[in-house]
Amino acid sequence: MKKIITLLFILQLIACGSQDSDSSADSITADAPLNEQALSDMKISLPPLPGKEDFVPELTKKSTVLMQTGSGEIVIEIYPEAAPNAAARFLELVEAGFYDATPVFRVVPDFVAQFGINWRDNYPQWQDNNFDDDPSLFALERGTLAFAKAGPDTNSTQVFINYIENNRLAEPRYNFTVFGKVVSGMEAVDAFIPVGEPGGGLDQGRLWNDGAAYLDSLATKPIMIETVSIVGSGVSP
C-alpha cells in the first residue's frame, strides 16, 4: 500500500534553521462574512519561484474554498492556471466530499501539515487514482498548498500546507507544485496538533483500512477537517 511522506529527510535541513513569513492576503473575519463580492475583491498573491519569473502564467482565475476544522475556519484560494492538474483534482475531491470528516494526520512544526485520507464508502478508490505532475513554477511560501506524492506522477488525494517557505521542494528531483494558498485562517493551521510518529504522523495504512477504529484508539486525537466546500469563483481584479 502506497505511503506518502513528503520528504521526511528534509526535516534535517529545516532543523538547522527555518524561515517564516505571514500571509499578505486580505483576511475574512466574522465582522466581514464570506460573500461573493468579498471573495472576488481579494487579489491573487502568489509569487513565482526564484528564476521562474519569465515562465509563470498570469493568474487571472481562482476558486475559493472554505474549510471548517476543529481548530477554526480556513479560507483557501485555488489557482487553476498555476497548476491545472492539481487544482482540478482538489476541486473535484472537494465537490465529492472527500475531505469531510478526515484528520490532519501529519503535522510537522516548521515544515508542513498534511491531510487527505478518507476510509469511508467508495473514497479509498481515489488512493491510487493518480494524476500527472504539473510544472513547479510558484514559490512554496507559508500557507501554500501542494499535493503530496511518492514519486513522479503519483499525486492522488493527499495535500500539505506549508508552515514555512519550502522552495527546496520545487527542485526538479522533487517537483512539488503549488496550486493554492490559505488567505484567511492561518492561525487555525498553526493550531493543528502533531500526532503519531514525529515527522511521519499517523499510520497511513491503518487510516485507509479502518480509520474510525484507529482514531478511536489514539490517546491524542488529531484535528479533524469537518467540512470543505467551494464558496466562490471568478476572475481576479
Image (cartoon, rainbow, N blue to C red):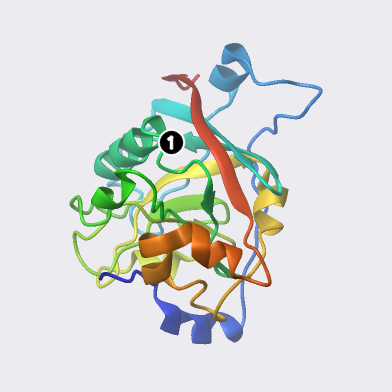
Residue farthest toward the top in the current orientation of the protein: 37
Q: Is residue 97 left or right of residue 85?
A: right
Residue farthest toward the right in the current orientation of the protein: 31
User: Residue visible at 18% across and 52% down?
Assistant: 132
Instruction: From this view, report whether residue 121 is shown above or below residue 96.
Output: below
| Amino acid type for the residue under numbered disc 1 | Ile
User: How many callouts does the rendering have?
Assistant: 1
Q: Is residue 174 left or right of residue 10?
A: left
For label 1, the SS is strand
User: Residue visible at 32% across and 46% down?
Assistant: 123
Residue underneath mark 1: 78
Q: Is residue 4 left or right of residue 104?
A: left
Quadrant including the N terminus: bottom left
Res 164 visible: no
Q: Position of residue 230 (x, y in %)?
A: 47, 26
Instruction: From this view, report whether residue 15 is shown above or below residue 132.
Output: below
Q: Is residue 187 left or right of residue 199?
A: right
Q: Position of residue 72 (x, y in %)?
A: 71, 43
Q: Nearer the viewer, residue 223 or 169?
A: 223
How crowded is the residue under tag 1: few (<14 C-alpha within 10 Å), some, or many (20+)? many
Q: Position of residue 167 (x, y in %)?
A: 44, 65
User: Residue visible at 50% across and 35% down?
Assistant: 77
User: Residue visible at 41% across and 49% down?
Assistant: 48
Res 10 visible: yes
Instruction: From this view, report whether residue 183 is shown above or below residue 235.
Output: below
Q: Residue 127's image quarter?
A: bottom left
Q: Position of residue 94 (x, y in %)?
A: 41, 35
